[in-house]
């Protein structure tokens, strides 16, 4: 229902959505926002998931690292049981920490995970040059630059939760410095609605950047065409699974089945064993997953003795924004 533009209940529920949105907006207007007095930028969204936040944050972190800037990532630690400072080389139980924290670590970044983002900043601001906050916006934190992102699918029916996928009404964009829109939204009806409140708009697109491969013993990075023509059992725990399916298909993969888990949830061994049986019976060639989920399940590779491939996705961001950002 959230992601259907036309539905019999859509118009009657709009009034209720406006009432809920007004209450959420009142919170934003009344509650004190905590400012971060440190070189920083936040990448958030008012959509619940699938808005490209983590992909954008990871891409920007990598761009800044190329310039010799020491980056720290601040994250709420959502989905994990352990919080604190995590260094890239730390040995961690992948089932105890947030999947996104693990993703940043595996890409070589220092991460500070705490439900209180300001405390998370204070934990690392003496050891980094610049801080990026992933998914900060609705926490009422004020980094130096406030960025909100959307993909085409993430907007859904434009209603506020629990009636739709938005955490806040669109008017909340007045508190953002920049809105990053997926280029599929250019000249769309959705963009027209967003333009009413956005101060600055830039565009981005996402693309598969490489393939991670675990053969049960070692992990290597391979070229994208290594999986072309393969029949895959897809495994994912993401907000909008259809986006991952389109990415897989763009790489020339035939999807035999897609095992879907709730966003950020653990991926269990029994489900992977079921997938392995289908691979052994030649119904599929491999397990294909997202980069985020790859690092969660890679520890299971030795137990199931199966080739697991993960798709790395990065963002191509409008050049004008990168100049504005830096």
Image (cartoon, grey):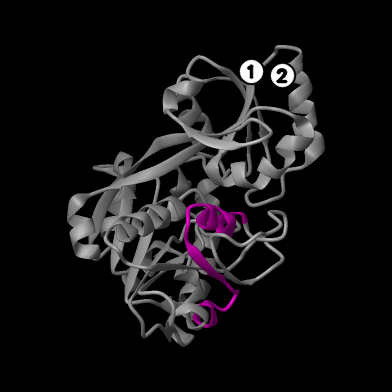
Disc sitting over residue 51 in the figure: none
Q: Which residue is mark 2?
A: 279
Q: Position of residue 71 (x, y in %)?
A: 39, 67
Along the viewing direction, whichever of 226 and 29 lies nearer the viewer: 226
- Circle 1 sits in a helix, a strand or a loop, which is it? loop
Range drawn in magenta: 99-120
Reply yes or no: does residue 4 show up in magenta: no
Tell me: 155 left or right of 98: left
- Residue 238 shows in this picture: no
Reply yes or no: does residue 113 show up in magenta: yes
Tell me: 115 left or right of 107: right
Position of the N terminus, as image quadrant, is top right
Q: Position of residue 274 (x, y in %)?
A: 79, 27
Tell me: 34 left or right of 2: left
Residue 182 against residue 303 in the figure, above or below: below
Residue 129 against residue 261 in the figure, above or below: below
Cα–Cα span, label 1 and label 2: 6 Å
Q: Position of residue 318 (x, y in %)?
A: 23, 49
> CB atoms at circles 1 and 2 under 8 Å apart?
yes
Q: Which residue is mark 1?
A: 285
Instruction: Determine the residue positioned at 46% across, 48% down.
Output: 154
């Amino acid at each position: 229902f959230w992601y259907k533009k036309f539905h019999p209940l859509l118009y009657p529920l709009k009034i209720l959505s406006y009432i809920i949105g007004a209450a959420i907006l009142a919170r934003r207007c009344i509650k004190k926002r905590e400012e971060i007095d440190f070189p920083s930028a936040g990448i958030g969204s008012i959509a619940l998931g699938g808005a490209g936040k983590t992909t954008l944050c990871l891409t920007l972190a990598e761009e800044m690292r190329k310039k010799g800037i020491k980056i720290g990532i601040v994250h709420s630690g959502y989905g994990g049981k352990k919080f604190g400072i995590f260094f890239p080389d730390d040995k961690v139980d992948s089932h105890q920490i947030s999947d996104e924290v693990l993703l940043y670590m595996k890409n070589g970044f220092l991460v500070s995970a705490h439900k209180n983002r300001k405390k998370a900043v204070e934990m690392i601001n003496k050891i980094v040059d610049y801080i990026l906050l992933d998914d900060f916006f609705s926490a009422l934190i004020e980094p130096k630059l406030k960025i909100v992102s959307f993909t085409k699918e993430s907007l859904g029916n434009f209603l506020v939760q629990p009636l739709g996928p938005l955490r806040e009404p669109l008017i909340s964009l007045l508190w953002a410095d920049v809105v990053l829109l997926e280029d599929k939204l250019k000249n769309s009806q959705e963009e027209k609605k967003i333009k009413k409140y956005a101060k600055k708009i830039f565009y981005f697109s996402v693309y598969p950047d490489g393939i991670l491969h675990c053969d049960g013993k070692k992990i290597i990075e391979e070229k994208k065409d290594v999986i072309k023509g393969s029949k895959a059992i897809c495994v994912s725990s993401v907000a909008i699974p259809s986006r991952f399916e389109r990415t897989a298909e763009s790489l020339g993969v035939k999807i035999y089945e897609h095992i879907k888990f709730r966003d950020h949830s653990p991926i269990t061994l029994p489900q992977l064993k079921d997938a392995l049986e289908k691979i052994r019976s030649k119904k599929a060639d491999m397990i294909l997953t997202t980069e985020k989920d790859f690092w969660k399940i890679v520890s299971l590779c030795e137990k199931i003795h199966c080739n697991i491939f993960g798709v790395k996705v990065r963002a191509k961001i409008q050049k004008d924004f990168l100049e504005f950002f830096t």
